[in-house]
Image: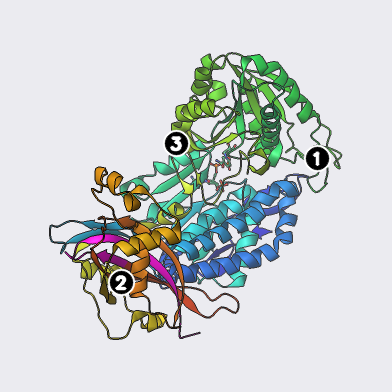
Amino acid sequence: MKLQSYVMGAWVSGVGEGRPVVDSVRGEPVCSVDATGIDMVQVADYGRRVGGAALRAMTFHERAAALKETAKQLMAMKEQFYELSFKTGTTRADAWPDIEGGFGTALSYASLVTREFPNDSVLIEGEMEALSKNGSFVGRHILTSKPGVAVHINAYNFPVWGMLEKIAPSLLAGMPVIVKPATPTAYVTKAVVQEIINIGLLPEGAVQIVCGSVGDLLDHLNEQDVVTFTGSASTGQALKNHPNLLANSVPVTMEADSLNCAILGESVKAEDPEFQLFVKEVAREMTSKAGQKCTAIRRVIVPHALIEPVTEALKARLAKTVAGDPTLEQVRLGALVSAEQAQDVREKVEALCSEATIVAGGEEDMPLAGLSHNAGAFYPATLLRCDEPLSANVVHSVEAFGPVATLMPYHSLNDAVELARMGKGSLVGSLFTADDQEARAVILGTAAWHGRMLIINGDCAGESTGHGAPLANLIHGGPGRAGGGEELGGARAIKHYMQRTAIQGSPTTLMAITREYHRGAKEIHDAVHPFKKYFEELQIGETLVTHRRTVTEADIVNFGCVSGDHFYAHFDEIAAKDSFFGQRVAHGYFVISAAAGMFVHPAPGPVIANYGLENLRFVEPVPAGTTIQCKLTVKRKIKKARRGDEKPNGVVVWAVEVTNQNGGPVAVYDILTLVERQEA
Ligand code: NDP
């Protein structure tokens, strides 16, 4: 069966013979993969023209809603993907982070956007920058969608998650994608894309998939396109140096295999919980996904005094690991993806043996549960030990992408730090210690070499997400050998597919572009109180200026008694005189409470509730006798998706400025209210 590609609105087959792909467990044919004859220039153009235009016409929230519903429907059909995944050699437990983790990542991104992004297509970043004396010329950063395509070249080990963690941020950013799965597991990726197309909630052209070589695609990308790559460091470097990508400054995010380390702290004793936690995590990382994880622990850095107990404990754990048919419940170690990958691991272990010796595994005649023989892709969990790691080279540079790790003893914490750095840049590192000072020393010494680090002790181990698991809200990527990329990490990942631009102009022009009120922009005044207006009726810049109120000694005393706040600055004449204030002043919280009393309209109305308060600054003290006044301006509006029986509503962010009798600000902040919408 030839695996088809979905391009330009149709499923098509390549015209070449194709690369055969076999079942990793039994070696039986699954499909052949080929994209010969597909016109890549047309594919990219279709993505930009059809998918890109449709996505950019949607707001962030509309894209998020389409992605969320798609991910929910995919989750409901997960069993069919597990069935396919067994053929790639993975157990159900190993496929979980790929399949359900993949759909969960898409859901996390969709909800992050609904929570944190505006219901608009332009994203504002940071605060307004004052650029002129009188405030008539200001600056701000905005991000807009790149009108290109994002080409995602994926690795074979995470055919579902690897695709989704890249396409979710791209689609949310408004950028169409061309997915290029790795050949050995392309049939799993294709099955998910097929369902995404069938679900039909993402616009046509937003998702295309090329199963097979991308041919001359990279030669035709332009300055608005983006490439991401996960796979071997050598292919990644070749892509980064592609002449057309260099000539057009096409961003290439690279996430490559790295020699991640786990360090057992110098303070840990064999009887401490951290010792067992360390052994368990190293063994788990070696065997899960048969060690084919870019985040797997490859270098196990252990205090010299504990090298023997750690070696013995790991050997005992690995000896209990059952290898074999991944569909069987007792199996913990599945197959590598292919006989070629097993051969590659064999060769890399041989190379490691120039500096290390095998202490467990290595032998190929491993027993396999549920199988009569090894069809070529099984490799035993193999532990090596290098006794002079500081003078070694191969153990820090050769990665056997399978169930293989190397133990390395160290004599001082400085040596442990040095060994971690010798990996020359990793995706992740972990430290097992209950000593927080030791943790600080190791993290500060090694963080610059890592994209993510976790510190495990008895307090957090129970709820730890583990060494090997990248998370949607934390950075995935690492410096140096790991490729220098940053994927995931919350909103950062989405911004990668958008162009950041500094805009400069008058506050009123910037308000029109960003749909956000900027101090100094034109205000709109109306006889109707803004709290009497529905969400749709409120205009950005609409302003209420309240009556005035003189703060009295009685206000200060009453507020102190109601709140119980008898801080000296409000109640001790002598101490207040000697203080920074020079006299007794009103409580800051009284000022904002009094302001609320001045600007609210007390009768029931479309304003449903006060939602919160942000960016509060008390600018000037307010002694008794100060006459305050406030200005309330519609700063930003966020239309919310309707939930359950809730009345349709939206969040209105109001800029509040409380001034004194001289017109100078005494308090500035934003308040958030939930306001009813008229339309359903
Ligand atoms: P590769 O780097 O060869 O392949 C990764 C992806 O790049 C695949 O989709 C591959 O497609 C594609 N590719 C390869 N050459 C080109 C090219 N010239 N232009 C465009 N795309 C290209 O990695 P492998 O999958 O072969 O694995 C080899 C090694 O990589 C492993 O042994 C391991 O060390 C490392 N690896 C690292 C991973 C990580 O997550 N960091 C994941 C997987 C592997 P195709 O498959 O069709 O060739």
Q: Main secondary structure of the magenta part?
A: strand
Residue at point 61%, 55% (across, down): 102
The amino acid pointed to by label 3 is Pro
Pointer 3 local density, CA inside 10 Å: few below 14, some 14–19, many at least 20:
many
Q: In the picture shown, does residue 457 fall above or below 671?
A: above
In the image, is residue 190 part of the stretch drawn in magenta?
A: no
Foreground of the two, 317 or 201: 317
- Specify whether 199 is left or right of 607: right
Q: Is residue 367 visible?
A: yes
Query: Is 367 on the left or on the right of 279, as rendered?
Result: right
Residue 105: where, in percent of width, then height?
58, 56
> For the N terminus, which image quadrant?
bottom right
In the displayed structure, 339 sits above or below 474; it is above
Ligand 1 quadrant assignment: top right
Q: Residue beneath label 3, please?
A: 479
The magenta region covers 656-680
Q: Earlier in the sequence, mark 3 or mark 2?
A: 3
Q: Amino acid at mark 2?
A: Leu
Give the residue at mark 1: 324
Q: Position of residue 399 (x, y in %)?
A: 58, 30
Residue 41 in which image quadrant? bottom left
Which residue corresponds to the image point at 51% horizontal and 47% vertical from the top-left?
474
Q: Is residue 293 above or below residue 539?
A: above
